[in-house]
Image: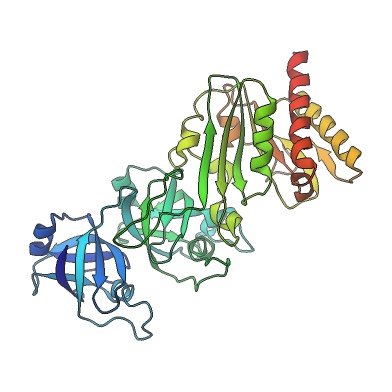
Amino acid sequence: MRYAQVRQAQSEWDDVIGYDANCAVHEDLAANLGLEVGDLIRVKAEETGVTRPYRAQRLHTEYGNDSVRMGGPARDRLYPDEEDGAPDDFSCEVMRHEDQHVIDMATVDQAYADWDDLISHSGRQVADERISVWDGLLDNLDLEIGDNIMLRNPDIPNQSAPYTILQTHEDEDAHSIRMGWGGRNRLHKDKSDEEVNTPDRFAVEITQFAPNHRIADSESGNELDTSFTEVEHHSENDIIVTAPHGGWIEPGTSEQTRILYNLLDDCSLWNFEGNNDGGGSFDRWHITSVDVQGECFPGFGMVEDHDWDWAISIHGFSYDTFLVGGLAPMGLREEIVSEVEDVIDAQGDDIEVTAPSEDEWELFNAHSEDNYINRMTENGQSGIQIEQPWETRQDEYVEEIPKAIARGLTSYLDSE
């Protein structure tokens, strides 16, 4: 740790001015801390006691060999309760940001108005899960378009969310990530699920997606998010059951996959579960099935390339219909439909059960070869995706639906 001064950045430093995450460190201070360009530091303002992480975007030789120079938005992060913002010059402590889970930092900014694929126009859409990444940052992280990435808002406790890289933007944006309001809002929820003034621009940490590790940072007080986890049980077999939106993302699906896992002989399991404190798990943790990648979900990475004979995903949605989708043979899906219909009839409920064709229920029929449930099967066409209403994810249905799926699958395999 070193005592230092935060000062204004030079107006011509375009890669620092206006960037919430970026700063310039004097080369003497950098030498004392063993820093290089691109390293991360933590700065603690003496007056407020607030600590924030930053990226050393450049080294400088301006006045003050103990100085860290920042633009106004970056300084304001250290004075969060000051209506007039941070002073131009103030005392601080500087230390290396040594968090094994943090890979890099970036500044989130608005998506451009004509980027329709990143802007949701009515309610929560897939656009809220997708982002544009500065092409230089993509190269630094050795990532590609289509990869998942985990972002954390370091200025609000327990604010993390996964995203999919949909596109890149040009090099005038130094270490920036652009997204629509819905995407930015995912990182601005308080514990009661109330929006916390979603800003146009803010700093984020890019973290390793390590959901089974919980670490508290004793120096900064920041904690890794504790509201998500992966469950994976893998053995050398032919069938896997999954819930990519378990926990409170799509309630009831985790429980149903566990029951189905126990019912089927020689079966594997993968669940991703989000349990956001106070609600909002769907808005925050949902990643659409065509975007799920093993690089971001390490448990999924252990099972996605096994070339399964059969793969089953269990979902929930807000419609009053039960769908048995996927690219698995229609005969198999109809066997499951028949068994589920018997269960629903026995309960006296009026819920339609169907195995949709390619032209029906296009957003939910899982007929895309890019859907992970098809991708992870050996022939690419043996995935089964269950979409179901809230009614069949509670009470007696929690156990009876997995039993119906197991009976339908077993009947079909025994007849082959």
Residue shown at 51%/30% (left/top)? 304
Residue shown at 52%/65% (left/top)? 189
Towards the viewer: 13 or 101: 101
Towards the viewer: 208 or 114: 208
Q: How many marks?
A: 0
Q: Would residue 16 be visible to someone looking at this image?
A: no
Residue shown at 35%/86% (left/top)? 84
Percent coordinates x, y for residue 202 in the rendering: 39, 67
Percent coordinates x, y for residue 169 in the rendering: 38, 55
Look at the picture and state if 263 lies above or below 394: above
Please identify the quadrant where the N terminus is shown: bottom left
Residue shown at 46%/45% (left/top)? 211
Percent coordinates x, y for residue 152 in the rendering: 41, 57
Look at the picture and state if 314 lies above or below 274: above
Percent coordinates x, y for residue 101 in the rendering: 34, 48
Left or right, 221 with reference to 125: left
Q: Would residue 83 be visible to someone looking at this image?
A: yes
Towards the viewer: 282 or 120: 282
Look at the picture and state if 75 lies above or below 110: below
Please identify the quadrant where the C terminus is shown: top right
Left or right, 140 with reference to 239: left
- The quarter of the picture where residue 360 lies is top right
Please identify the residue farthest to the bottom as the structure is shown.
Answer: 84
The colour scheme used here is rainbow
Please identify the residue farthest to the front as the structure is shown.
Answer: 218
- The quarter of the picture where residue 343 lies is top right
Left or right, 191 with reference to 218: right
- The quarter of the picture where residue 341 lies is top right
Left or right, 183 with reference to 310: left
